[in-house]
Image: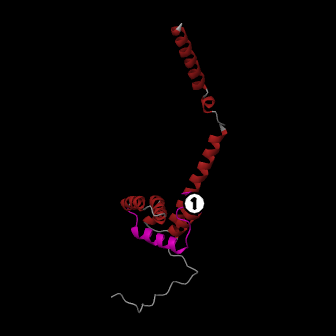
Amino acid sequence: MGLACMRLVAAATAVAALILSVDPSLAQGSEPKAGTQRQQGGEADAQKKVDEFAEAAKHLNGPAGNPECVWIGRRAVILLFRDDLDTAFRHMELYDRFGCPSGHIQAAFRCFLLQGSTEPKAPDQKTPDVSARSHACWINPTPELTAPPPSAAAPSSITNR
């Protein structure tokens, strides 16, 4: 009787596998429309990235406007801001390997810092404010600042002995 039960279980498993392989949406148990919505959102993000690359190429002369330099450089600036130095340095090594100008990262990071502070340790790693700021500073790393630059500090009369 044990052998008959084993054959019955094996047959039932084979039939279930056959049915689920014909219609995989039954196995997932989710709405099939969710995937198409995700693809449409991905297409919109891809178009936005293409537009950002085109804008950078239009405003920047030389290799700083190349898509690979824009992509890696902006991420390096954001990683530096978030104190993820190990990953930022790896991005910067790759940035140099592509022949991108290293001075542009420095200028964009300076611009990023001078625009004021945002929460660097935000739980959402892709904060739109940070992404938009990094893109704006990448396109124009020397913007006109509304605040006057800080004056040089007066030397202190107190000395350490």
- In the picture, measured across the screen, residue 63 lies left or right of residue 11, that is left
Residue at x 55%, y 18% (from the top left corner): 14
Q: Residue 117 occupies which quadrant of the picture?
A: bottom right
Judged from the image, the secondary structure of the residue bearing numbered disc 1 is: loop
From the viewer's side, name the closer residue of 53 and 58. Answer: 53
Say which residue label 1 marks: 127
Picture coordinates of residue 35, whole percent (x, y)? 62, 41
Residue farthest bottom in this picture: 157
Quadrant (top left, top right, bottom left, bottom right) of the N terminus: top right
Residue 157 placed where, x, y %? 41, 93
Give the answer, above or below, for where 123 lies relative to 81.
Answer: above
Q: Give the percent coordinates (x, y) of residue 26.
A: 63, 29
Q: Residue furthest front?
A: 161
Density class for disc 1 (Cα within 10 Å; few <14, some 14-19, many ≥20) is few
- Is residue 8 positioned above or below 96 on the image? above
Please tell me which residue is depicted at 59% across the width and 25% down the height of the picture. Answer: 20
Can residue 100 be found in the magenta stretch?
Answer: yes
**Residue 38 to residue 9: above or below:** below
Magenta stretch holds residue 154: no
Residue at horizontal 39%, vertical 61%? Answer: 89
Closest to the observer, 132 or 160: 160
The C terminus is located in which quarter? bottom left
Magenta stretch bounds: 99-128
Q: Amino acid at mark 1?
A: Thr
Q: Quadrant of residue 54?
A: bottom right
